[in-house]
Amino acid sequence: MKDFILIKDSIFGDIKLNWDQQKIVNDPNFQRLRYIKQTGFLYLVYPGANHTRFEHSLGTMKLTKDICKRLNLENEELILSGLLHDIGHTPFSHQSEDVVEKYLHKNHEQIGEEIISKSSIRDRISESSLSFKKILHYFRGNDEGKIITGSLGSDRIDYLMRDSHYTGATYGIIEFERLKSKISIKGTSPVIYENGIISAESMLIARYHMFISAYIHHTTLIAGSMFRKALSASIESGHIDPKTLEEHTDFSIISEMLKVKGYVRETTKRILERRLFKRVFYSEMNKTNTEDIKQKILKFGIKDEAFIIIQAGLKTNIEDIGVIDSNDKIIGNLKDKSKLLNVLSKESKNKNILMIVSDEKHNKKMREIVKKIM
Amino acid sequence: MKDFILIKDSIFGDIKLNWDQQKIVNDPNFQRLRYIKQTGFLYLVYPGANHTRFEHSLGTMKLTKDICKRLNLENEELILSGLLHDIGHTPFSHQSEDVVEKYLHKNHEQIGEEIISKSSIRDRISESSLSFKKILHYFRGNDEGKIITGSLGSDRIDYLMRDSHYTGATYGIIEFERLKSKISIKGTSPVIYENGIISAESMLIARYHMFISAYIHHTTLIAGSMFRKALSASIESGHIDPKTLEEHTDFSIISEMLKVKGYVRETTKRILERRLFKRVFYSEMNKTNTEDIKQKILKFGIKDEAFIIIQAGLKTNIEDIGVIDSNDKIIGNLKDKSKLLNVLSKESKNKNILMIVSDEKHNKKMREIVKKIM
Amino acid sequence: MKDFILIKDSIFGDIKLNWDQQKIVNDPNFQRLRYIKQTGFLYLVYPGANHTRFEHSLGTMKLTKDICKRLNLENEELILSGLLHDIGHTPFSHQSEDVVEKYLHKNHEQIGEEIISKSSIRDRISESSLSFKKILHYFRGNDEGKIITGSLGSDRIDYLMRDSHYTGATYGIIEFERLKSKISIKGTSPVIYENGIISAESMLIARYHMFISAYIHHTTLIAGSMFRKALSASIESGHIDPKTLEEHTDFSIISEMLKVKGYVRETTKRILERRLFKRVFYSEMNKTNTEDIKQKILKFGIKDEAFIIIQAGLKTNIEDIGVIDSNDKIIGNLKDKSKLLNVLSKESKNKNILMIVSDEKHNKKMREIVKKIM
Amino acid sequence: MKDFILIKDSIFGDIKLNWDQQKIVNDPNFQRLRYIKQTGFLYLVYPGANHTRFEHSLGTMKLTKDICKRLNLENEELILSGLLHDIGHTPFSHQSEDVVEKYLHKNHEQIGEEIISKSSIRDRISESSLSFKKILHYFRGNDEGKIITGSLGSDRIDYLMRDSHYTGATYGIIEFERLKSKISIKGTSPVIYENGIISAESMLIARYHMFISAYIHHTTLIAGSMFRKALSASIESGHIDPKTLEEHTDFSIISEMLKVKGYVRETTKRILERRLFKRVFYSEMNKTNTEDIKQKILKFGIKDEAFIIIQAGLKTNIEDIGVIDSNDKIIGNLKDKSKLLNVLSKESKNKNILMIVSDEKHNKKMREIVKKIM
């Protein structure tokens, strides 16, 4: 191992890793992120979207380091926390989250915390001179940790830039240099300079547009819900032990699912070959009880396996972020200072997608049923 | 001359010119656009912003052609109108407009109309099989002409992309391919598909952010107002004949101004060397009577030449654009369909900049005066 | 299915697919390319290099179509051949080729030919009005087929641009627009205009530099040879049936190999976690008999599994391509017309890498052995 | 003035200027570079090529600083020398050099030296704590000064990247991050690591390709030679005092030339409007005596003003640069280590362009004459 190495990133160029960072990156728990796609099944919409949590984690670390440098924060723990922030992700990132939460009762942050605290990652941290306690503190998003995980955090800057580069959908190309230079720290909380409000607006609206055109693209939603249904079925039927979920990667879970004959295998093949369920109903409405709708449809004699009711929402609400003037005095809250962001934050609650999809055989009948019950 | 030639554009790659288009481009009235900077004095903020109306005109034509092709509009007049749309610009583009309007009582569109109707450009059009009448019709922004000049027009798409490329301020990098593919025609008016609303939002908000960070950047405003004041003085003192204004380029007007000894020459040199007046007052408020303020300041014994009162506003109001569904049925108006654009359009009226600037010698005294009177 | 659809490509923007092309793309044999990385194990060097043969095939088709359009070739079979040109690739693309050839006695072109001739792809072609015979003719690289597969072909243009985009190593960013516009057809063979020689030079030298910095990067070579050794062992031990090789994808073969306990599983895990063998010898020399060296090393009591002897070469030889003048007259051969390409083409034979690598335990001893025998 | 400011560069993003650097940039001698196009008349070929020596100087400084940082050289004089390296350029950069040398007997480096030594720039340097002597030493290209001016210097890296960005001709997009990281210092001379040879090759071949497609593009050559002929005539006729040449900018010299009635004005207008002389003869041959050819043509009764004989060559010879291995030991010379560069360096002597051009009226007759005498 060398004092430092350079890894070439397709977004930010050479990323420098010091000794401690190299050790983390070399750990199998971190290498595992190479096999977890950043944007789940989005590659079925944008064929270039095969990028992974591995490179995103490197990019997030790099941006965190840049921000620390600008703010004269010498905080190696914060930087390492940037590198580790997604260590707990499960197959296809957010696409498996609901299933994991259902069976393991923990989300990816909690799994991440366990990995940092109990695995060989913990050993690597112990070998360094860094404070494990601080790393965990930031990992949980406390204090300066929000430089990574906050509404204007390095995590978001990285994924917007990265998702744009790999999809070709340029909504997410943001003026990140300016944004980085307008973030400051007040006490332990990130704040933004008044003359950085347009950078904040630009980034948060870009994120909203990436939500619409990518993260909640109907194809992604359909593939994801088919995947979750098949994965749950694999677990329910005893073919996959839920305890193993947190060790799996995209390909290992898919390989397991392909072994489960019948519905699970067929659904998995459908996803891989992009033979997806088709929409029979689509609406933007208030959140609703999907169980009710499901029961109604079942009464028409449709098999549970033939259709899925999907509900998805925007996550564009914006946390409280202080706005400071050139004298570093807080003069208000970002959401109040920007009318555009005010609207955007509210939109989060209003916009909810309800979609019903089914396989080819049932498409026609489903349309009729849906007409009757919706 | 060849059947067609290719010109390499830094934004859109090879741009193809047919026979008729080549003739226009070769005309001295069009070549003149090589010497008019697209963004006036913005190069004093972003050193790369030396791009010209010449390349912008080529880009606008290319985008217009792309849109026509997609809509199966065979309309060479519309395409040529895209090429010609900025033919009437005067030195430093919008920076000289007020002076030109004051002395010539016409704006750049009217000057453009004259050039198209009376100069050798008219001869070139006559030599082609194209309808002069139609070209003029579109040039005036009628009917399909809005594909070029409208709120979502090719003019804007080009300048946002171009200004971003040359300044390095990436706000203006828009998803132009998708936007182009979501524009349609209903009757003779451009409309946008419902699933193109986010592209429209993205473009119009990008434009707003380019306004803030570039088009009404305080340095641009100061240099521009110094220029207008010196140019007016050159005219008032009889050194520059206002009738020649429409023939001038950036460099020819500057050269003339440098010949006018005293205040005009000194101010011109100040601009060239970026020794600009400094702010003594800045506020965002309702439009106000600047003449009143000026008179008050003059009473304190400050020379008129030592200070300038600048007023500038956003131009983010959005015209009525129909939104159509996948059956080409109009389902509403863009501004009503998008909450973000609704807010943005209103913002246009509210945000107004009032700035008072002065030279170094008077900075201190001016601050005191301003405190008293504002 | 619609008359045409657009797929967003991260390199070339929207790629349009007509009815026939959509059917091919939707076929499971083609969808399989989504799961075969374009550049094998290069992602272990450049974390962004997760792009696949799927998007590369789309890009190659798009470029082929562009070239056809420019040359007024209405040849849908040629365009479809561009789409299909990599249909026969096996796991990790070129990384599994030697093993496949050893056990199946066919290369990826031959497998591709079988898929086109016998699978459901054949049915899709039959449903169209296209000539199957012509498609196969071009697929084999005959006549205009060289527009795709030749030294200056669309295949290469695409992968150079694409590999650069995903790795971040910009050597491969070539002036592809100009190159495309300088390719012509003489009889049925692609030729290049004299004033396109520098474009050809630029592309072929870029390819050479991508060879050095990516395709034969030592890490790629080591991971690849570990993979081939483990894959061969899986076959020899009867765990993997060689007949299935052509159906496998990256992840399915890896999943199978992980099931083979002992050496195979351990090696596979090593690759996944980037715990690779380390170099104990590296030299550029003439091709040599590696079997001899292997026997000598074995005599020192080193297990076969502990080390690998790797031999790799440049593939920069350049085929004969006619150069034409502006009157479309052939005036020579590309290699003779360009001194740089002449040198480059010869280099191909001279440069050969010989590398010996071993696991950590044997590194020290191996170095001693190698000193004695080399 | 602030401790440091950021200037947004379209190539390298934010460029930071400290106090001393700001003072230089604010000096009128430096601001003058805003009005000198980096690539002379190349904008007549590539409409985007309006970039200036001003931004190129900032970029060169930034790259020099990056290289210093990587090599742990704390050398503010070297960095400032990067900023100043082009301070002596005259109108249209290299396009006016021959005329300036003829009448002032100094080249742009010598003029630059005078500006640094005698103008207000000298005062600005004196106000800083930097050594004027050292700055001059590096400015002359001595020792570490070659980091800026050498064959692999920051000057070249910047202009290749920049010229590509503004022209859209992507030949010059080089892997500059890697190149920067492979440059080192041995004694006081820049050297390159063995594993950086391909980066060096890539850059120097890119430069060669930019020469062919831009720097010696026939349109640039024609416009340039027309300009030099008209400028010389302005001087010979006493309209322009050669002593003023070093103070002029692109626009000021053009304005002066437009005032000289007759041939000079007409030629200047021709350049501005791109009505250029056309080729009647073109050949690549050994250097020849153009005076002889001129006399022969004159004998046919053609006026001197009606034609120009242009001679131009490649400047691709490569200076001696040491190649070092990973132990920092010199193992050879770049030109010997790379066969491609060896060929390229020789090419410099061989390739010479001889071109004869004339105005429209004489085109036909000139062709006949040229047939007889060449």
Image (cartoon, coloured by chain):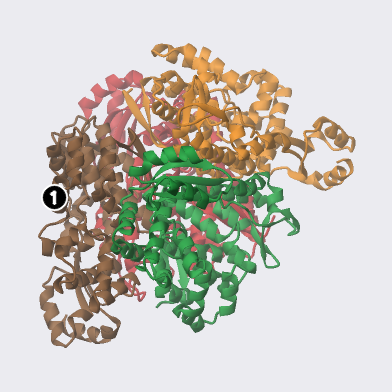
Chain colours: A brown, B red, C green, D orange
Q: Is residue A115 left or right of residue D58?
A: left
Residue at coordinates 34% horizontally, 43% vertically from top-left? Answer: C360
Q: Is residue B356 left or right of residue D324?
A: left
Q: Is residue C267 left or right of residue C56?
A: left
Task: List x then y, in percent, for residue C7.
Answer: 41, 66
Quadrant (top left/top right/bottom left/bottom right) for the N terminus of chain B: bottom right
Residue at coordinates 41% horizontally, 35% vertically from top-left? Answer: B224
Q: Specify whether residue C17 is in view.
A: yes
Q: Specify whether residue B91 is in view.
A: no
Q: Nearer the viewer, residue D356 or C234?
A: C234
Instruction: Note whether A26 is above or below B228 in the view shown.
Output: below
The image quarter in which residue D301 lies: top right
Q: Amino acid at mark 1?
A: Glu
Q: Nearer the viewer, residue D245 or B257?
A: D245
Q: Which residue is mark 1?
A: A114
Task: List x then y, in percent, for residue C186.
Answer: 70, 64
Q: Is residue C60 left or right of residue B358?
A: right
Residue at coordinates 44% horizontally, 32% vertically from top-left? Answer: B227
Quadrant (top left/top right/bottom left/bottom right) for the C terminus of chain B: top left
What chain does badge 1 belong to? A
Task: List x then y, in percent, for residue A92.
Answer: 26, 61
The image quarter in which residue D128 lies: top left
Task: List x then y, in percent, for residue D361.
Answer: 79, 45
